Amino acid sequence: MLSTIESINNVVNDFIWGVPAMICIIGVGLYLSIRMGFIQIRKFAYAMKVTIGRIFRKREASDGALTPFQAVCTALAATVGTGNIAGVAGAIAIGGPGAVFWMWVSAVLGMCTKFSEVILAVRFRETNDKGELVGGPMYYIKNGLKKHWHWLAYLFSAFGVLTVFGTGNATQVNTITSAIDTALYNMNIIADGNTTVISTVNLIIGIVLAIVIALILIGGIKRIGQVTEKLVPFMALIYIVLAIGVVLLNIKNVPSVFVSIFKGAFNPASVTGGAIGSFFMSMKKGVSRGIFSNEAGLGTGSIAHACADTRKPVKQGFFGIFEVFVDTIVICTLTALVILCSNVPIKYGSAAGAELTISGFTSTYGGWVSVFTAVAMCCFAFSTIIGWGLYGTRCIEFLIGSRANKPFMLLYAFVAIVGATMDLGLMWGIAETFNGLMAIPNLIAVFLLSGVVVGLVKEYFAGEGAESVKR
């Protein structure tokens, strides 16, 4: 039965992430880039300047809303996760170093896509019966498109509900338990091969996580924002500092690493010794894992941004650009450099995960660093669980109503126990498949509503934005 499911999933996954999907994802990003004039470097630079300048401003949000900083932290909580660690490692092992180049391509175009998604989410959001701001692809489809397109909103929400249990929960919890188990092995606290003790430890971890997840999610949007605004900067700082250290200690390898990335993007066999000879495989893994990481094109991040206490959709859109930049250009690139600069053995063509990234750290610093990498991975995965918990709640609320929120949150929390105690090899493939399925209704909506985005951007740069650009 499982082999049949796996075969079906592989066929669907290959179709979703095949040539048509690559054309759609890259094409929509390029189309939006040109339409919005992102080729004007001065305006793009201004957008980043505004974002960085405002992101750390302290302020209080009104009831049922998040501050813009909390909104971007919540979005980053969902995107900065195992995709940055295990996802990048897998992309390099299966697609070669050239996959990193295609991650960058997906990120640059993804900035424009995420920018559009956030603008639309803020523009077409609603206030629910609890007084909370709600928005995202389902709402900008419902409120921005004609009625005959509304089925896309329900399709997106249905895919979202199915996706969160795998992408947002079970696989993330599995990563947490794997990281803790590895640290316990390396510190000789548990003997390697003692499956009984490990199973008990993992069960306890799953139960504790389930309780904590339930308490945070049931606490509402305010509590989610309070957790993510503290957790995300902390975990990102730890990981970035450790990764930069690896790069600096292996600085002599950096030039050859970048050569392998650019060369491998178009001729993988020349870098991997023939183990990977497909240009398309390198591109597919780079783009798919890049999107898995930054979620540009999926529309999920816009759900968090829609909660921001702001009246300026374009201003919040700049935070969407910043989100993709931090996630992929900074953190994913650093992960790739940790693996490639440290010269750890890479079995090209074979599946790989977080253990490859961890080996990059331990080969440079020694075994003691596995504790810090375990902490970083646990923070990354836990933040993703919280972010996706919000996404799933918004999707189920759109489908059934707010009465389903608490039962869904409790069910979502319970899945953490499953993720901690079961082998989830197939779940990773299914998660990637549903990620791709979510992109379909969202990209259609973003394309159809691109005129609204262009209008709002032009209006902004003709008014408030124009004055700032002149300075």
Image (tube, helix red, strand yellow):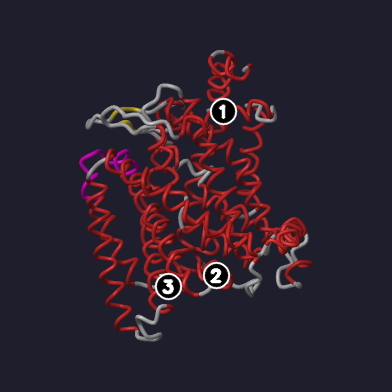
Looking at the image, is mark 3 or mark 1 earlier in the sequence? 3
- The quarter of the rendered structure image containing the N terminus is bottom left
Q: In the drawing, does residue 391 fall left or right of residue 295?
A: left
Q: Is residue 187 magenta?
A: no
Q: Which mark is residue 450?
A: 1
Residue type at mark 3?
A: Leu
Assess whether mark 2 and mark 1 are in contact (beta carbons under 8 angstroms). no
Foreground of the two, 194 or 125: 194
Q: Relative to 17, is 249 above or below? A: below
Foreground of the two, 391 or 262: 262
- Label 3 and label 2: CA atoms lie apart by 40 Å
Foreground of the two, 347 or 201: 201
Residue type at mark 2?
A: Tyr
Residue type at mark 1?
A: Ser
Looking at the image, is mark 3 or mark 2 earlier in the sequence? 3
How many numbered badges does the structure rendering display? 3
Q: Residue at x 42, y 73 (%)?
A: 2
Q: Quadrant of residue 276?
A: bottom right
Is label 3 in a helix, a strand or a loop? helix
- Label 1 and label 2: CA atoms lie apart by 48 Å
- The quarter of the rendered structure image containing the C terminus is top right
Residue at numbered disc 3? 2
Residue at numbered disc 2? 365
Whether residue 251 appears in this view of the structure is: yes
